């Protein structure tokens, strides 16, 4: 199912139409009135739009249904894939500020959808981001006023994440004589997962809400992001007292985690 929603700037009343791709999976063997609702919000990487990704993404709901149907406890899994502004049929031009507004608008859609399910038996939110989407997911997880006891952030899945744009500049342009690595003070987009994890810890401490479990999933043959980025993010979580697990899909390149070495199964089991 494809839904269209409006991402709005609260100050300047700027409205941008963005698209969501929504799919549902039930683990119920028979129809039950009350079941737990689990929303999985997916934030994509930079390469390509959602349609080319769907054949690979769809393996995760299939694996969830297969692995969860044998377990006690009925649940309805709602996969919500956000198409950022400037991607697929979404309007506007992409920027970190705009994409974060789109992520918040997606959470508003989730809130309204949950309200339309009055017989639900509790709700959990899982944020899953790939590459730059991992930066979006950590940024959203760190924001105040988004999550609550009713909309509980349960898990954070970071697929092929990097520390931030500044660290990637230093990775892509290691030569000190090149100017690019020195331009970070002028960056408009930061996607700083290192900093966002610290803010997430502070937010949960202030609010008294439980911090999410975190899965860091790396590609063993990642040609873009060094292995050290995932290792440092894991250490950051441990230093902050956040529950974290790191897995490596040894045979995968940066965009191949879902199609190599059981990556799809690892994500489905985390969900």
Image (cartoon, grey):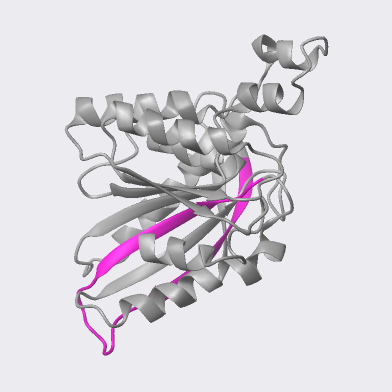
Q: Is residue 98 magenta?
A: no
Q: Which residues are magenta?
A: 16-45
Q: Residue 60, percent across and down? A: 49, 69
Answer with left or right where residue 82 lies relative to residue 204: right
Residue at the location (24% across, 42% down)?
Answer: 148
Q: Nearer the viewer, residue 182 or 207?
A: 182
Residue at the location (45% across, 33% down)?
Answer: 233
Residue occupying the far left of the picture: 208
Quadrant, the C terminus = bottom left
Answer with left or right where residue 93 lies relative to residue 229: right
Numbered disc total:
0
Q: Nearer the viewer, residue 167 or 41?
A: 167
Residue occupying the far right of the picture: 178
Answer with left or right where residue 72 lies relative to residue 248: left
Compared with 121, 175 (above or below) is above
Q: Would you identify the image quadrant in which residue 191 lies?
A: top right
Compared with 111, 224 (above or below) is above
Residue at the location (45% across, 61% down)?
Answer: 267
Inspect this view and state whether residue 106 appears: yes
Q: Residue 80, percent across and down? A: 49, 59
Q: Residue 87, percent across and down? A: 71, 49
Compared with 23, 232 (above or below) is above
Residue at the location (40% across, 72% down)?
Answer: 64
Q: Main secondary structure of the magenta part?
A: strand
Compared with 11, 254 (above or below) is below
Q: Residue 41, percent across and down? A: 46, 54
Quadrant, the N terminus = bottom right
Q: Would you identify the image quadrant in which residue 252 lies?
A: bottom right
Inspect this view and state whether residue 143 appears: no
């Amino acid at each position: 199912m494809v839904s269209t929603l409006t991402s709005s700037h609260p100050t300047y009343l700027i409205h941008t139409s963005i698209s969501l791709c929504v799919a549902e999976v039930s683990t119920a063997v028979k129809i039950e009135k009350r079941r737990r609702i689990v929303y999985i919000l997916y934030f994509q990487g930079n390469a390509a739009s959602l349609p080319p990704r769907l054949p690979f993404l769809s393996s995760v709901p299939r694996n969830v249904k297969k692995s969860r149907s044998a377990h006690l406890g009925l649940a309805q899994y709602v996969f919500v894939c956000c198409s950022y502004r400037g991607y697929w049929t979404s309007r506007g031009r992409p920027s970190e500020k705009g994409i974060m507004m789109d992520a918040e608008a997606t959470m508003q859609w989730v809130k309204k959808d949950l309200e339309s399910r009055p017989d639900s038996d509790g709700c959990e939110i899982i944020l899953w981001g790939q590459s730059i989407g991992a930066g979006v997911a950590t940024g959203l997880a760190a924001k105040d006023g988004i999550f609550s006891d009713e909309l509980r952030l349960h898990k954070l899945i970071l697929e092929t994440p990097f520390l931030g744009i500044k660290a990637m500049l230093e990775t892509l342009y290691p030569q000190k004589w090149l100017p690019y690595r020195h331009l970070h003070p002028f960056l408009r987009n930061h996607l700083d997962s290192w900093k966002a994890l610290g803010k997430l810890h502070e937010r949960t401490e202030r609010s008294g809400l439980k911090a999410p479990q975190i899965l860091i999933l790396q590609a063993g043959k990642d040609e873009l992001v060094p292995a050290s980025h995932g290792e440092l993010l894991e250490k950051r979580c441990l230093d902050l007292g956040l529950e974290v697990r790191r897995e490596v899909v040894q045979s995968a390149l940066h965009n191949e985690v879902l199609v190599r070495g059981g990556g799809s199964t690892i994500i489905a089991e985390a969900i």
